[in-house]
Image (cartoon, helix red, strand yellow):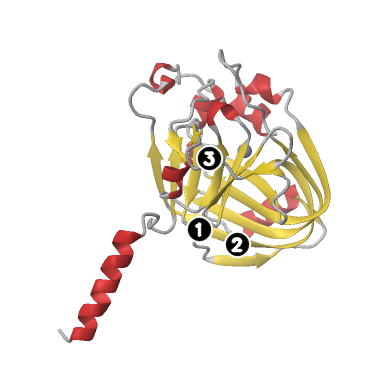
Amino acid sequence: MPPLRHLHFAILALLLTSCSSFQPRHTLTQTSTIDALLAGSYDGTMTCRELLTKGDFGLGTFDHLDGEMLVLDGKVFQTKSDGKVYQPSLDLTTPFAAVCRFSPQNSFVLPVKTDMETIKKFLDEKVPDKNSFAAIKIKGTFRKMHTRAVPAQKKPYPLLADIAAHQPEFHMRNITGTIVGLRSPPFVTGIGVPGYHLHFISDDQQQGGHILGFELTEGTAFTDVCNKFHLLLPEGQSDFHQLDLSKDRSQELMQVEQ
Ligand SMILES: [Zn+2]
């Protein structure tokens, strides 16, 4: 083998070992399950630092349910219940999050002056792989953006459905920003959120949250169909193992997500 090829191999090996965030493409990694969250399991089990080794794009929540998580370009953002966006310490933990190494296969210019339901239908047509996961990034300008951010909770933890009934909500107007979203297949019931789950951050990184609705002025969607799903369950002393996860919580999830 000529020396140049040796060098190439050496560089490749160095890249592979030095880059801890190297993850296979089109792979969604999730920690814990949505039903555990619905059952009140809000204690973080994975640090943001470790989460970022699983992907650079995604969403979730934080220890004690302290706000809405958005991961974009390898940075973690936290929209707290005051509606403001923070960049938390990477030592902060999460009880529930899903990330991938964002590698879009396609991009689509979105129909102008539309709402969330129209955009969902548009993406369903353009990305028909409904039984795979899809990571979705939308960069755009929004005439309206309606979000919420749940407040941090103290023990004994109330159920998520009861918290969501009094959640702080935010109404933004004429704002540019990025939607970080996941579309999950129907068979993830109990594990994840079937259908669309979208979070938002403004371009100035001041406002965000879990999306309840929006009106798009104009924008572009980038989609990464993920056909591999990696589920990481909490280890050791976590209360996860004491939860009753036998019941169907789909109705509660509907209440919480909308
Ligand atoms: Zn959310």
Quadrant for the C terminus in the image: top right
User: Which is in the foreground here, disc 3 or disc 1?
Assistant: 1
- 135 vs 185: above or below: below
At x 44% / y 57%, what residue is drawn? 26
N-terminal of the two: label 2 or label 3?
Answer: 3
Q: Within 10 Å of the Cα at label 1, are there few (<14), some (14-19), or many (20+) other Cα atoms?
A: many
At x 51% / y 54%, what residue is drawn? 74
N-terminal of the two: label 2 or label 1?
Answer: 1
Name the residue tied to disc 2: 222
Name the residue tied to disc 1: 102
Q: At label 1, which amino acid type do we have?
A: Phe
Name the residue tied to disc 3: 186
Q: CA distance from mark 2 to mark 1?
A: 9 Å
Secondary structure beneath label 3: helix
Q: Within 10 Å of the Cα at label 2, are there few (<14), some (14-19), or many (20+) other Cα atoms?
A: some
At x 62% / y 54%, what residue is drawn? 124
Relative to 164, 52 lies left or right: left
